[in-house]
Amino acid sequence: MFNSCYTALVPLLPLFSFILLIAFGLRLPGKWAGYIGSVLTGIAAVAAYYTAWTYFSLPLDADGTRPAVEILSWEWLRFTPLLAIRLGIYVDALSAMMWVVITTVSLMVHIYSLGYMAGEKGFARYFAFLGLFSFSMLGLVVAPNIFQTYIFWELVGVSSYLLIGFYYTKPEAVSASKKAFIVTRFADLGFLIGILILSYFTGTFDFQTICGSAQDAAGVGGALFAPALQASFLGLSALSWAMLLIFMGCAGKSALFPLHIWLPDAMEGPTPVSALIHAATMVVAGVFLVARLFPVYALMTPGVLEVIAYVAAFTSLYAAVVACVQTDIKRVLAFSTISQIGFMMVALGVSGYGGHAGEGYTASLFHLFTHAFFKALLFLCAGAIIHTVHSNEMKAMGGLRRYMPVTHLCFLVGCLAIAGIPPFSGFFSKDGILAASFAFHPCMGILMTAIAGLTAFYMFRLYCRIFHGPYSGDTAAAQAEHAEAGHHTPHEAPAVMTAPLVFLAVLSLLTGFIPFGDFLSSDGLPHAFPLQTAVAVCSVLTALVGIGIALYAYGRGPRPAFQRMADQPNAFLRAAKNRFYIDRFYLFITHRIIFQGISTALAWFDRHVIDGVVFGSGKLTEKIARKIRIIQSGQLQTYALILLLGVLCLIGLVLYL
Amino acid sequence: MANIPMTYYLVLSTILFFAGIYGFITRRNLLAMLISVELILNATDINFAVFNRFLFPEHMEGLFFALFSIAISAAETAIAIAIIINIYRNLKHIEAQKLNELNDLK
């Protein structure tokens, strides 16, 4: 059975690593900070695997579901006899799966960073923040109630902020970290209001109670959700509002349109951080939360779930189009992440509850699982490339396969996985999503298949631009420039960096064969999802077409026609390159309307009215004080006289009043 | 002695008290002010003794308080004279109204 000791170790070891490194990191010689962080994360990973293994080998309940286990529970705040906030560790199939993903990717990123961050200023600080992030993310997924989720949700936001702004001397990094923090905070405002509405009407924060009641809508659930369903505001029930607002928080964290703007900028952080936080773990927290509350979404507010599907499908399309024209390799990966998260959310949105209808739910989490590994792999490869080329721009690359064979192979595996080519993992999970989309509506299925084709195109465009065609550093001018900057011909990354790449590449190859439905499904009943042959053939053909176009266009360097399109873009391409001006639109709103319109007026009011009152009272006091001060002459006898008069007055008062 | 009524004693102490206060407020010389303070203290000592004698003849606390008060005023006088001597040594005068070296509102 479960032993709470080693389970509690999983989140606490990274926390310990954070405290240790933040306190003593500067005194540790050489790479010791990194070794300590990696070893502690490694132990946490082993404990997490063991927890997952123990959990999945538990006997099934009589009704065939796998019971959730609350391993630790500690009452933290009690508001009323009914409403209390507990902190604890709640293990079910979803959180066990998330633990495996988080600790694996975190461990790989720790090891990789030993090489990538070697010699950087703030090496210990970097590993300390990685520890803080791992702790927060591990605590987030095992939250037994929505309030603990919220606490850790903010903690991952903070650690993301700290890590994006890691190079705090770079103005872009600082503004990117602020942007990420503010945009997600704005979304979290909605999340918090959603939590408050939900808990106000249901009187509980507990996931188990909320989800259990949703599954039992005719019985207990009816009573629990009745007040929230009856109260209505602007034509929607309070429950719908709550679930929509909670989804707003998810959209902010998971970078769904229109709150996606922070994620591309977040690429200013160190690349391993992008791999861990902005590709594999934190950005899927939104998917995780919708999955956590899935019974409520699916059974109580199916309308909201449909909204989620549409928002996510649009995000996915938008990000895929933008990714096709970006030239910064990390930005391409960032937009591809947004697009893939869109895929996961679509799968949740189109999914029904239970049995065959719940296929989307399983496919979504399966995609989360596989995506974490191959996207982390792609980012870490990109890091190795940037490490040796000293640039993020595609035009500084090309032909690198001769110089970095291992990275090349790993990147190719990642690309094939994300493009959905069998037998790589992405194929299996994406097939599930596409099948669920077709089951929802054929249009949705066709749209998602087309986006999958676009994915294949932009990923192989990226692949060709990096690894094929002529190497830009071969020209004499580039070589002179390189020599001047003290750079060198590209070379393979050290083993400490390639080992995680190879490990993740192997995972990207193998994870697709996990019978995911046996472990995780919407209603907890094991359910085998057969491969949808028709859908699979369609999606593979589309992906092959995308790859074919990319290979044709960029296989030996960009073909003249495509180069011309990039040089003299038409209106659509220009708009796509500028991310369809969404950022400009936000700037317009924040700078023109909020800063210039509202803030200027408020600042005037503050400076003249509020400050006027404050300063005025100060000045008045000073003036009065100057007058009164004359009394303080320093003449002892004057004081004595005044004292006497005072006493006489008091006596007079006592005697005659 | 028992024929003298209590009021007489109190009138005497009141006169002494206000004479002391008058002197404390009007005299320029620190020594004169110190003497005035002594007058005030003597007035209170008389009050202690009188109240004890007339109101609680079986107790002695008032008389002891008078004795205490005399001893304390002696100690206080010693300190005050020491201060006055130091003032004289530094400033060559003991005029109370001119002791305003530390005051910026001259």
Image (tube, coloured by chain):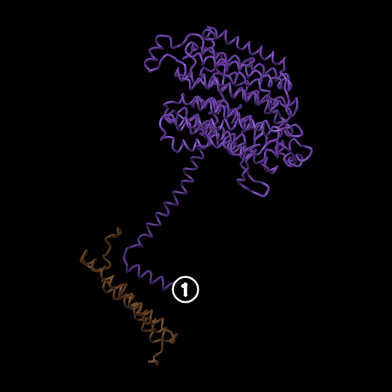
- In the image, residue A595 lies at what x, y percent? 51, 34
Location of residue A535 by image quarter: top right
Q: Nearer the viewer, residue A128 or B27?
A: A128
Would residue A123 be seen by someone viewing this image from the given angle?
A: yes
Residue that label 1 marks: A653
Q: Nearer the viewer, residue A411 or A623?
A: A411
The quarter of the picture where the N terminus of chain A appears is top right
Judging from the image, mark 1 belongs to the subunit labelled A
Q: Dot 1 lies on which element? A: helix
Q: Residues within 10 Å of mark 1 (few under 14, many from 20)?
A: few
| B76 up-or-down from A538: above or below | below
| A343 up-or-down from B91: above or below | above
Would residue A597 be seen by someone viewing this image from the given angle?
A: no
- In the image, residue A231 lies at what x, y percent? 73, 41
Q: Residue at x 42, y 27 (%)?
A: A120
Q: Which chain is tinted brown? A: B
**Residue type of the residue flagged with mark 1:** Leu
**Residue extending furthest front?**
A1
Location of residue A460 by image quarter: top right
Location of residue A323 by image quarter: top right
Q: Residue at x 76, y 33 (%)?
A: A63
Q: Nearer the viewer, residue B88 or B60?
A: B60
- In the image, residue A13 lies at what x, y percent? 53, 36
- In the image, residue B87 lies at what x, y percent? 24, 66
Q: Which chain is tinted purple? A: A
**Residue extending furthest right?**
A218
